[in-house]
Image: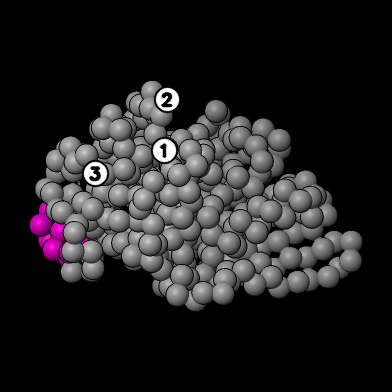
Amino acid sequence: MGKIKYGMIGCGNMARGHLGSINKIEDIDLVACADPFDGSIEEFRRENPNERTRYFSSHEELLEQDDIDAVVIATPNCTHAQIISDALAAGKHVLTEKPLGINHKQLSAIEDDVRKSDRIFQVGLECRYLPVFQRMSGMIESGRIGLPRMIWCKEFRGPFLEKVGNWIMFKEKSGGAFVDKMCHYFDLVTWFSRSIPRRVIALAGQDVVKDIYGVQPDIYDNGWVIIEYENNVRASLGLCMFCKASVDVEVGVIGDKAQMEGFFMDRRIKFRDYATGSVSDIDTRGSDPEIEKLSHRGGVFYEHLAFIDNIRDNKTPLTDFNVGKWSVLVSLAVEESAANNGMAITF
Ligand SMILES: NC(=O)c1ccc[n+]([C@@H]2O[C@H](COP(=O)([O-])OP(=O)(O)OC[C@H]3O[C@@H](n4cnc5c(N)ncnc54)[C@H](O)[C@@H]3O)[C@@H](O)[C@H]2O)c1
């Protein structure tokens, strides 16, 4: 197999994030793109050095192209389920942006489509491919932490960036702020727990971001979540969408033998060993600073390397359907609990 021939479906912000990483990988040839919005195509075209790329105004036209091996889906959240179905039916390998879907009906439909297909299906939960979180997972696997007992995560940030049509500001199109943003971290804490969720409790509100980019959003802008896992690990996560300070995303784990806190932007881990009392500062920055300037600190670059490797060797992705499904199931439970004043949602 020569280069893997890609089609990009959706040419907005995130697609341009993918493009930066794709341009760095010799093994990928971006042969086609599709987006119904000319403005997105024009902006994408300006940043795409590949003169062979063909452009289409619908994903259906793109999927008719026989020379495409794999597609990247980077369209609004509410559209993923249909495009995944069409892409698998057309025999393409799929790397879809998170969240997989925005409701239970979509998740079931995607599950059927994935089960019927023999193509590689990978979900764009790029945090799992980042060295900082891979290292944390490795420390859990090796037993250095002991049994994980408590996990926490906080993302304190400003409002979502402006989108084409501002779909992200509306629950009907995005699934809600917890579905869109926190599915990454629900996935990370589930991965670190080495278990599956038992129940979820959430309190959230829309208190500050009520008028932005000329629209009135209907999504939460802050909240706290507690997840309890089958193995009694408990996790607490916080989201703020109106923080004006630059605060790093922090993910921490307390185990029987040690605790650790990892930082997304800083790419360092603070590790505290209980037996020796030692505190170490682990630097997970790689040798190539150019990679870490790419989308999501290089996470998107690493997920593409994994995707093409999975296609070549017919391997199950680290972020397969099941992983993507749990990240959405937790997100939907959080939205439901918050809408019902913190009612516990049991799986
Ligand atoms: N992994 C991450 O960390 C991360 C970060 C940001 C966004 N995302 C995800 O990427 C996706 C896109 O987000 P964005 O920020 O690029 O939004 P965007 O609004 O900037 O771009 C979306 C593009 O999709 C196009 N589109 C809509 N329907 C389409 C269809 N049927 N076929 C082809 N194109 C279509 C729109 O015209 C637009 O150009 C979302 O699912 C979002 O959740 C992921």
Within 8 Å of ligand 1, the CB of disc 3?
Answer: no
N-terminal of the pair, mark 2 or mark 1, is 2
**Can you name the residue that lies furthest to the right here?**
275
Q: At numbered mark 2, what does the secondary structure look like: helix, strand or loop?
A: helix
The percent coordinates of residue 269 (x first, y second) are 66, 67
Q: Nearer the viewer, residue 159 or 249?
A: 249
Q: Which residue is mark 1?
A: 121
Q: How many marks?
A: 3
When the figure is inspected, residue 65 is found, relative to residue 268, above or below; the finding is above
Q: Which mark is residue 67?
A: 3
Name the residue type under label 3. Answer: Asp
Q: Nearer the viewer, residue 323 or 256?
A: 323
Look at 22% across and 39% down and name the residue there: 66
> Would residue 1 appear left or right of 140 to someone viewing this image?
left
Measuring from the top left, give residue 206's x and y in whole percent: 36, 53
Q: CB of mark 2 within 8 Å of CB of mark 1?
A: no
Q: Earlier in the sequence, mark 3 or mark 1?
A: 3
The boundaries of the magenta stretch are 36-45
Residue 341 in the image: x percent, y percent? Answer: 47, 39
